[in-house]
Image (spheres, rainbow, N blue to C red):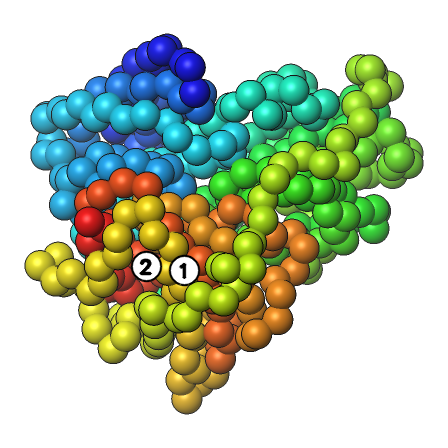
Amino acid sequence: SDSTEETKYTVRAKMGETEIFDGTKTQTYGYNGDFLGPVLQFEKGETVTINLINELDVGTTFHWHGLKIPGEADGGPHNVIEPGEEDTIKFEVTQEAATLWFHPHPDGDTSEQVYKGLAGLIYIEDENIKELDLPDDYGKNDFPLIFQDRTFDEDKQLNYDAVMNEDGTVGDVSLINGTVNPKLTVGQEKVRLRLLNGSNARNYTFKMNTGDTFAQIATDGGLLNEPVEMEELTLTPSERAEIVIDFSKIDDERDVALVNDSDDILLPFEVTDEAAAEIDIPDKMNQFSVTEAEKDLPVTKEVELFGMMDMVTINGKKFDPERIDFTQERGVTEVWEIYNKPDMMGGMIHPFHIHGAQFKTLSRDGEAPPRNERGWKDTISVSPDETVRLAVQFNDKGVYMFHCHILEHEDNGMMGQIKVE
Ligand code: C2O
Ligand code: CU
Ligand code: CU
């Protein structure tokens, strides 16, 4: 790109107090504020400088989930910033428009730090998306929604040690963007929701309580080629999706809400009479493709996910910061085959994530992936006994993590390292 622009950010991990429940203060963590973080806006082609400051009383890292970034700036477990210290990273944004996120990644302490509130969003824009007719009026017809579940103790505190489950901490309270009783006011128009499953371990299945469908327009790493009509959509931890709901087609007499697969309300909507100019979502939004050559590539990396609780492994091993599990050449596409090996109990879904890359899903158990997975992904859910093939390429050099994104599994060692040369 021709862009010579430069964006500078300061991202400060800090402790805070948040009134999540009326009249009580909950001790939280946040980026720049008390709880969660800002939306960082990058543009393809520009150079971004971020000053990272750790004001916590524990070491942390700043990981850019989904971003193609040199290994040394990726914020993996090797990039710990001690309390009171700071660091600066600088990189060029080389990838297309997408909704990514950032969170800490210190070895063994990721889950607790995310649980307490360290998570923020990144929007990447490019020329293509600016020309498309999509809802993009932030806070009006374009909303970020971070879904998380938490358990609060009697004093309404996030006591992680008390609730921590080795198999993934799930909570009984649903939070959206850090609030417990969210409600979204929307007009009778097409509204874009950028969904992030920011939970430690819970899978969410989203659907409309009215039975209406919605259109999925983006995956983790970019726009789909065309909108995909969906009755429901499941996101495992760290997956994102952008959906468009057409509120002009929904009967506003009813209580409209986004619900989960047990019909529990996640997000109620208040639909007003207002409507902006009609938006025609284009049939052709992107140029994503899997080439014949990619389909013909042999499998050169095999990854076996196994176990539950603290007995989780990848290829029979636990994470060792001193061990490099794989190497790959930068700019070369390789096929990774991910297999989720069931155990005696049957096993569970593991969301498999690779740092520093966006990959293509080639197949699920030998079949073409569903239409809404035919786009760039950085995290893929793998069910027990399922085999998923991915075409993976890295732009930059460095050491990157790959792991299960159930954060307690990651902290329990369900993680490996790849060195890109
Ligand atoms: Cu969301 Cu290893 O990261
Ligand atoms: Cu990541
Ligand atoms: Cu797992």
Q: Which quadrant of the figure has residue 64?
A: top left
Q: Are marks 1 and 2 in contact (CB under 8 Å)?
A: yes
- Of the residues shown, which amino acid type is indicated by label 1? Phe
Q: Position of residue 123 (x, y in %)?
A: 48, 27
Q: Position of residue 245 (x, y in %)?
A: 75, 36
Q: Residue furthest front?
A: 293
User: Is residue 179 visible to the viewer in this orientation of the structure?
Assistant: no
What residue sits right under mark 1 in the picture?
A: 352
Find out if the beta carbon at label 1 lies less than 8 Å from the nearest ligand 3 atom. Answer: no
User: SS of the residue at dot 1?
Assistant: strand
What residue sits right under mark 2 in the picture?
A: 403
- Of the residues shown, which amino acid type is indicated by label 2? His
User: In percent of the image, x 24 and y 37: which residue is there?
Assistant: 70
User: In percent of the image, x 43 and y 75: which residue is there?
Assistant: 340
Looking at the image, residue 380 lies above or below residue 113: below
Find out if the beta carbon at label 2 lies less than 8 Å from the nearest ligand 1 atom. Answer: yes
Q: Residue furthest top?
A: 5
Q: Nearer the viewer, residue 399 or 102?
A: 399
Looking at the image, residue 355 lies above or below residue 52: below
User: SS of the residue at dot 2?
Assistant: strand
Q: Which quadrant of the figure has residue 316?
A: bottom left
User: In percent of the image, x 14 and y 39: which residue is there?
Assistant: 80
Question: Is the residue marked by circle 2 packed among few (<14), some (14-19), or many (20+) residues within 10 Å?
Answer: many
